[in-house]
Image (cartoon, rainbow, N blue to C red):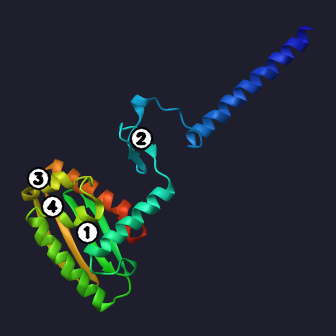
Amino acid sequence: MQRQKSSLMLIISTVIVTTLVVIGILYLSGLLQRPSSPESLVHQEGMVHTADMAHQTSTSQDVDARQEEVAERGSEVMPFDLEHTTHLFEKTAYGGLQQVLSNDGDTEQIALIQAHLQQEALRFQHGDFDDPAQIHGDEMPGLAVLRAEYEQVEVVYTPLSDGAQIVYKAETPEVTAAIHVWFDAQLSDHGAHATDGR
């Protein structure tokens, strides 16, 4: 009888230890996560705010619909063809680098890119961010700060052989952060038409 109890205890102990080891492996590999309390929630990409500021994860259909809507509005503002160009939004320690490049070296597209980005750079230098607002919405992250603090940003346009670029250099950490979230919003909204250069 004593031997049976010992064997049973050994089996139960083995099962418990094995279960704990498996849970630990799943947790460390990222396949299992601790449940989050409302206080520990952090904002992650793909989350949208509801009216009561609760976080909900957007579906791929929501993202696709948003990107289609942005592409449609973008075609009214940007003269070049989104299907034949790529936007690059590369964050830097001082602000960021934005490029629009022709995918196939089409000289007509390159001329349209250069004319548009040169015009946008001039507008941005004077605090006019109406074109991005028209494409992405007035509530676009970072936009309010850039409009209010435009004098704290150096905006430099440069033509490139396959398109053009704008370099943004902010004078304060607040404006640098605004440029970064502004870039993130554009990367998300432009989808396959954009890259962060990584």
Q: Which residue is mark 1?
A: 98
Separation of residues labelled 4 and 1 (CA atoms): 12 Å
Circle 3 crowding by C-alpha within 10 Å: few under 14, some 14–19, many from 20: few
Labels 1 and 3: the sequence-earlier one: 1
Q: At x 17% / y 48%, what residue is drawn? A: 174
Q: Which residue is mark 3?
A: 148
Circle 1 crowding by C-alpha within 10 Å: few under 14, some 14–19, many from 20: some
Q: Is residue 191 left or right of residue 118?
A: right
Residue 73 percent coordinates (x, y): 32, 69
Separation of residues labelled 2 and 1 (CA atoms): 30 Å
Q: Is residue 34 left or right of residue 47?
A: right
User: Image quarter for residue 120?
Assistant: bottom left
> Mark 1 and mark 4 in contact (Cβ < 8 Å)?
no
Q: Is residue 77 left or right of residue 30?
A: left
Residue 101 percent coordinates (x, y): 31, 79
Report the number of numbered marks: 4
Give the quarter of the figure containing the N terminus.
top right
Kind of residue indicated by mark 2: His
Residue 171 shows in this picture: no
Circle 2 crowding by C-alpha within 10 Å: few under 14, some 14–19, many from 20: some
Q: Secondary structure at mark 4?
A: strand
Residue 189 percent coordinates (x, y): 36, 62
> Mark 1 and mark 2 in contact (Cβ < 8 Å)?
no
Separation of residues labelled 2 and 4 (CA atoms): 32 Å
Kind of residue indicated by mark 4: Lys
Kind of residue indicated by mark 1: Gln
Q: Which residue is mark 4?
A: 169
Image: 61 above or below 116? above
